[in-house]
């Protein structure tokens, strides 16, 4: 008999084992160590009281990991991962888990849920739509190597002393997804490195990235200083070693300047995702 309950009393070891089995045959196979999943859950602000699992004879066979945050005065839950082990798919477990957890999230004052899903994962998209999720926007993901060595005129690149989000958000063309949000990056300061591009002491662009894996989490240039090679200078500053692998995920499809830039510097648009939303 299958039992649905929160993950509040489930060990991280058990969640990690099921996570890896569930994603072993994914479009992009994923295998995380306990430490890596713990770091991901911290970054996603996962709350196991708001997360849900499907259990069969105490074996965890499916899960939904939910993080929570306040965004623009709304209480939001983010799906940091949904998985069902291969042998238990096709039994409607995702909908059963949502049927269990949605009333509880509503009781806790959650205004809406958000998630990303790979564009080609039609089965998952249909599953989320049956629950009530709607497509909010399309997202593009990039990876690869680049050999930029250009330097922008009169631009000084140096570490950011801190995050002035009121100013830095004014550089954005779109609101970042959950794992690239301002709140997420505040949590990851000890892991990430951040550089600013300055002209006469004025911040004109910035990049925030993880030097351990080459993941760029935000890159943006002041709207009055674009087409001055500032973004190229920022990228060049983090790729001084030949063969440096870079990646950046969840770029809004409608951000034509950033998408064009990433392609022009030689990165590959390796996968697309959908940003989906469910109002409670």
Image: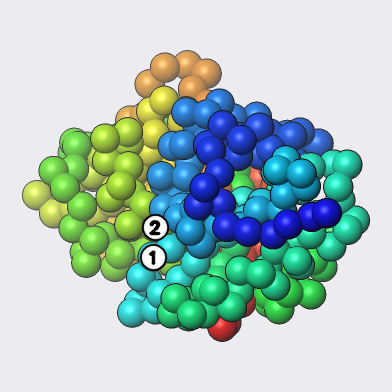
| 264 on left or right of 168 | right
- The C terminus sits in image quarter: bottom right
Q: In this view, does 120 lie above or below 39?
A: below
For the residues labelled 2 and 1, the Cα–Cα distance comes to: 11 Å
The residue wearing badge 1 is 69
- The N terminus sits in image quarter: bottom right
- Residue pictured at 48% horizontal, 58% vertical: 49
Between 23 and 156, the residue placed more toward the observer is: 23
- Residue pictured at 41% horizontal, 25% vertical: 212
Between 244 and 122, the residue placed more toward the observer is: 122
Q: Is residue 143 above or below residue 119?
A: above
Could you classify mark 1 by the number of other residues whose Cα lies within 10 Å: few (under 14), some (14-19), or many (20 or more)? Answer: some
x then y, percent, for residue 213:
47, 28
Q: Is residue 129 above or below residue 154?
A: below
Q: In this view, does 57 lie above or below 51?
A: above
| 1 on left or right of 9 | right
x then y, percent, for residue 257:
50, 59
The answer to whether any part of residue 114 appears in the image is yes
x then y, percent, for residue 164:
18, 58
Mark 1 falls on what kind of element? Answer: strand
Mark linked to residue 181: 2
The image quadrant of residue 122 is: bottom right
Disc nearest the viewer among 2 and 1: 1
The answer to whether any part of residue 61 appears in the image is no
Dot 2 and dot 1 residues touching (CB under 8 Å): yes
Mark closest to the chain's N terminus, 2 or 1: 1
| 244 on left or right of 190 | right
- Residue pictured at 70% horizontal, 43% vertical: 58
């Amino acid at each position: 008999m299958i039992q649905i309950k929160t993950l509040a009393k489930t060990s991280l070891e058990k969640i990690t084992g099921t996570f890896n089995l569930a994603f072993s045959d994914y479009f992009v196979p994923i295998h995380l160590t306990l430490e890596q999943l713990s770091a991901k859950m911290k970054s996603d602000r996962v709350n196991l009281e708001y997360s849900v699992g499907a259990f069969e004879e105490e074996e965890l066979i499916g899960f939904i990991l939910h993080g929570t945050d306040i965004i623009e005065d709304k209480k939001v839950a983010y799906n940091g991962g949904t998985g069902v082990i291969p042998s238990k798919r096709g039994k409607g477990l995702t909908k059963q888990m949502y049927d269990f957890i949605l009333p509880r999230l509503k009781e806790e004052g959650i205004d809406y849920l958000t998630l990303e899903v790979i564009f080609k994962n039609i089965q998952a998209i249909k599953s989320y739509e049956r629950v009530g999720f709607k497509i909010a926007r399309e997202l593009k993901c990039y990876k690869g190597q680049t050999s930029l060595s250009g330097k922008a005129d009169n631009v000084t690149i140096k570490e950011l002393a801190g995050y002035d989000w009121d100013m830095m958000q004014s550089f954005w063309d779109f609101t970042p997804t959950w794992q690239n949000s301002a709140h997420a990056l505040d949590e990851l300061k000890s892991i990430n490195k951040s550089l600013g591009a300055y002209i006469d002491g004025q911040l004109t662009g910035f990049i925030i990235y993880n030097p351990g894996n080459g993941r760029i989490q935000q890159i943006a240039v002041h709207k009055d200083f674009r087409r001055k090679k500032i973004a190229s200078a920022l990228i060049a500053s983090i790729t001084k070693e030949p063969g440096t692998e870079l990646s950046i995920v969840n770029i809004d499809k409608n951000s034509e300047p950033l998408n064009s830039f990433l392609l022009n510097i030689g990165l590959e648009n390796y996968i697309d995702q959908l940003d989906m939303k469910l109002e409670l």
